[in-house]
Amino acid sequence: MRKLEQAPHGLHGELAVPGDKSISHRALMLGAVATGTTTIEHWLTGEDCQHTLQALRDVGVPIERKGTMVTVHGKGDAGNFVAPATSLAMGNSGTTTRLLMGLLSGTSFTSKLVGDDSLERRPMQRVTQPLAELGVKIDLTAAGTLPAQVHGGPVHGGTVRLNVASAQVKSAVFLAGLNAPTPTVVVEKLPTRDHTEIMLRQFGADITTSADQRTITLQPQPHLTGQTVVVPGDLSSAAFFLVAATIVPQSGVKLTNVNLNPTRTGILRVLDQMGADVTIEPIPTTGELWGNLVVHSSQLRPIHLTAPDIPAVIDELPLVALLAATADGTSTIRGAAELRVKETDRIAVLKTELEKLGVAVTEYSDGLAITGRPAWDVQNSELDSHGDHRIGMMLAIAALRSHTPLTLQNEEAVAVSYPQFFTDLEQLREDH
Ligand SMILES: O=C(O)C1=C[C@@H](OP(=O)(O)O)[C@@H](O)[C@H](O)C1
Ligand SMILES: C=C(OP(=O)(O)O)C(=O)O
């Protein structure tokens, strides 16, 4: 259990958050199937990315790591991976699992994928079904969950229509399609994060996106060449401090070198619509967009989000709920049933934890209504991450503006995506 700190004088100072989780996973995987060496700078050392790194080592990919600097000696093709001696451990990471199902389909052996209790409850048919359309054979439990057996073998191209808005599923299809002799086309329900497409292009693939962003076409058998990937700061991690500085009076914080891919910046649009004070300083780059973000505290108005808004803010919805809990009125988040199949059922957990703060929450099958109040009326000071990194960090941010001391159970979950979260928070709390 951890005692959560308040911030009576606000948060202050400048911070470079750790590398982006989605990009860190993808750099390892593309590096593994490219020809030559890939160097990854500012790689995220969080537990989820460590699981991707270890799984690739387990199938024979030589990878060296010194802190946040990683070198991948590419095997040129998944067909050159070697059968692992044991099961591949996915830990808590949905991204590792689903993307590797695509990548490992190009091998010449069967891999067994296992996860922790949370991951072994999460749905996997959403990826095995589209992959089956390309000829990939994957066995799951009767419940459609891990453990999985991924049978490597021939893959063919084709057009796959996804009925869930998921970048993980889209990416799995393209990673499988790398080995197909004909084009692989994905038609998305709604546009989702496009880090895989951007990085495939950097490594030399011919992959194009239609004007409406929903149809993406990968030309067959690209020759991928090892690259230097400099990972930008993770906006999903920066978001904790954007929200903290917004809701804790007297704050002023600058977050540097953050990824600003428009498929990820829903939280910036939410903050803007709620009346937050965030200034974006773009940094000239090619490929992924980068920038600095400067934020000062403000009083907020409510927001209403519906299905098309969700993919670009999916991992920040716990933070949107917290913003709503301080806003002047009732906010609604709908079309977000995906939240129920993340590390926890984030809809149920947000209701439980926000009600402890005395905030009125209505639960829907696909979202929440939250009525904010300027000062909370704490009913139960013992908060709990429920083993979910993003819930734990959101609650630590909530505590900064609480007038009642709060504690957090299962705080170690933050290491999944942000191992130094509490140290970075402490730096901004003390820096005044
Ligand atoms: O592709 C990715 O890197 C991710 C996609 C999202 O999941 P879904 O694809 O399941 O929406 C997101 O929630 C996850 O944290 C990372
Ligand atoms: C949902 C998340 O990740 P994953 O699906 O990779 O476990 C997350 O980081 O919030």
Image (cartoon, rainbow, N blue to C red):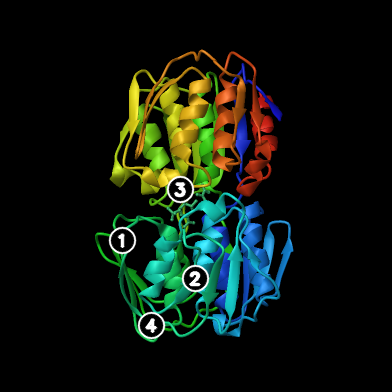
Identity, as a three-letter code, of the amino acid under mark 1: Glu
Mark carried by residue 139? 2
Q: Tell me, yes or no, whether the two marked residues, 4 and 3, touch with CB atoms within 8 Å.
A: no
Q: Tell me, yes or no, whether the two marked residues, 2 and 3, touch with CB atoms within 8 Å.
A: no
Q: Name the one closer to the observer, 83 or 213.
A: 83
Q: Residue furthest right?
A: 66
**x, y percentage for residue 166?**
39, 56
- Quote the CA–CA distance across marks 2 and 3: 20 Å
- Quote the CA–CA distance across marks 1 and 3: 19 Å
**x, y percentage for residue 268?**
41, 39
Q: Which residue is mark 1?
A: 188
Name the quadrant of the N terminus: top right
Under 8 Å from ligand 1: the CB of mark 3?
A: yes
The image shows residue 259, relative to residue 10, as above or below, that is below
Q: Which residue is mark 4?
A: 156
Q: Which residue is mark 3?
A: 341
Identity, as a three-letter code, of the amino acid under mark 2: Asp
Q: Quick check: can you spot residue 228?
A: no
**Residue at 65% across / 39% down in the picture?**
421
Identity, as a three-letter code, of the amino acid under mark 4: His
